[in-house]
Image: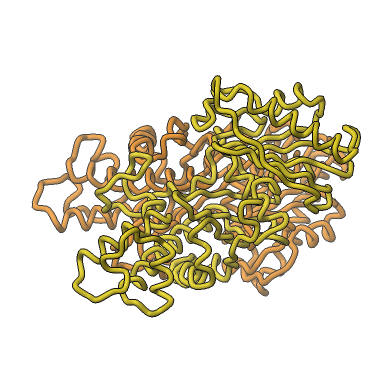
Chain colours: A yellow, B orange
Amino acid sequence: MNKYCFGVDIGGTTVKIGLFTTDGTIVDKWEIKTSKEDGGSRILSDVSESLSEKMQEKGITKDEIEGIGIGVPGPVDDKGTVLTCVNLGWGTFNVAEEVTRLTGITNVKAGNDANVAALGEMWLGGGKGYSDMIMITLGTGVGGGVIHNGKIITGTKGAAGEIGHMLVNYEEEDPCNCGRKGCLEQYASATGIVKVAKRLLAKSEEESTIRDKENLSAKMIFDAAKEGDKIATECVEELGWYLGVACANIAAVVEPDVYVIGGGVSKAGVILLDVIQRHYEKYAFHAHKDKEFKLAELGNDAGIVGAAKLVIN
Amino acid sequence: MNKYCFGVDIGGTTVKIGLFTTDGTIVDKWEIKTSKEDGGSRILSDVSESLSEKMQEKGITKDEIEGIGIGVPGPVDDKGTVLTCVNLGWGTFNVAEEVTRLTGITNVKAGNDANVAALGEMWLGGGKGYSDMIMITLGTGVGGGVIHNGKIITGTKGAAGEIGHMLVNYEEEDPCNCGRKGCLEQYASATGIVKVAKRLLAKSEEESTIRDKENLSAKMIFDAAKEGDKIATECVEELGWYLGVACANIAAVVEPDVYVIGGGVSKAGVILLDVIQRHYEKYAFHAHKDKEFKLAELGNDAGIVGAAKLVIN
């Protein structure tokens, strides 16, 4: 195997890029702006130029590059074809082939950014040492990635790992962003737990340190729960219940070794793992009990790490 | 690749065995009794003798055998280790290694019987032509198998594909056979739909051809639904609803191409596929819509077919 590889994580605002050694050390990382003009047509040539400049700067030749991995904020199939990516203005085309054309490097692979981040956490983060892993990212929404035998399950049309859109509440009346009602994302995301809190506060007269707070946030709710606030604790229990039940149902399908929880909400730390795991163990089928629950470790670097891993076997 | 292989499906009463050509033709199939005496210690030597006799009968030498695949009614890990199998009286040991020792054939693989049946349906049955498939077997219980990239997802402890134990009803008060409450199996199995029918009949005064029937069966309920009986139709709708929602949640994890429905209940035919698919399409995330729903085609042969496929790449 060659000495270096690149991991590229394309976001709506910036493209994060990492230069790695193929044994898993970050040599350098940097960002460039995402040029969304003209349907995002310049994004990949900007990336290609940036990689070329970095190779010159470091005195690295093409022969030393094992490959380029790319995470894209949209569905990507097994062959590297992105199937429309609204955030970037992209239609359907093969990202991997295009980057090969631009760089002359043949080993190029592309994947969905959430899936790629999961792969990164498996390689160097919370899922290190495991080969069958579920990553759940609790941010503004709830994302996910499914790793089986050390590789991403992409799904037929690149839409596997949409854990946030598992249907977990049949009674819900408010719609999810996806238009359906009762998705996990409605209870377990940063915005979801705030909505849950507002509902619980409205239904109760109980005093609470999170009552009448402006800009109530997931962090404020978890902080209050850590201090023993009753309503905040109920919110955390509700989030843990939905996540625990969802993880139990995921186990019934693929039975992973480990669940890695990331995203902004995961900054709450051990209290979050504990509540998910407690409900998981209660609801899991007997053959699925005793699984590991871990916090993600790579933060914003998960995308470039996982992208790099795409091209390393 | 050699010309022949064996597929062995070990059940609690009989062992089904098939001799196949490696291009997928059944040359012969037969059964032997499952000897459960002495903790099932003679089962594998009985199988081994039976294979040996068949090879003599057909004039086939060991050199012509590509391998032996074995389905076992219990959890089996990726390496062929069975993790206790109550039905057969087995503890934990490596089935594949034991059969190699007994037969002198090195390419031996073992898998859980439900997973192996799923592989069979992918190879020569309802899932032919697909590589990412979910099999759901609606029998006395609800079994399942998850095929990804043409191979079984076994799960860390051999317990993936336990589709029947997805939690689908949080309000259920009666326990499932597994001890939890609200498993898919409680509504979608042959016994489950009868329980659903009894509940609906008890709650309603509506005339129904399935009212007061002795030995009410899934078949009687489907037949009545086909004739337009209102309560029977409600039962079928309820079964379809739970299966449709479960399939939508499976798609959120692995996004397969096709769902293959087998087991005794699937003899109901197109009415069953239609009701599952209708509810699936209603509840699936937008990126997961338009999947295929098919009936299993191999019946009791799925186990030997899938077992044979285990040793053919």
**Residue closest to the far top:** A38
Q: Nearer the viewer, residue A74 or A151?
A: A74
Residue B88 occupies quadrant: bottom right
Q: Position of residue B74 (x, y in %)?
A: 60, 61
Residue occupying image coordinates x 66% and y 49%: A119
Q: Position of residue A246 (x, y in %)?
A: 45, 57
From the viewer's perspective, tell me whether residue B276 is left or right of residue A251: left
Q: Nearer the viewer, residue B241 or B233?
A: B241
Above/below status of A200 relative to B152: below
Residue occupying image coordinates x 48% and y 53%: A139
Q: Nearer the viewer, residue B142 or A40?
A: A40
The C terminus of chain A sits in image quarter: top right
Q: Nearer the viewer, residue A235 or B220?
A: A235
Q: Position of residue B97 (x, y in %)?
A: 80, 60
Residue occupying image coordinates x 37% and y 46%: B245
Above/below status of B164 relative to B256: below
Residue B15 visible, this orientation:
no
Q: Position of residue A283 (x, y in %)?
A: 44, 67
From the viewer's perspective, tell me whether residue A112 is left or right of residue B51: left
How many tags in the picture? 0
**Residue closest to the far left:** B205
From the viewer's perspective, tell me whether residue A241 is left or right of residue A158: left
Residue A1 occupies quadrant: top right
Residue B147 visible, this orientation:
yes
From the viewer's perspective, tell me whether residue B56 is left or right of residue B93: right
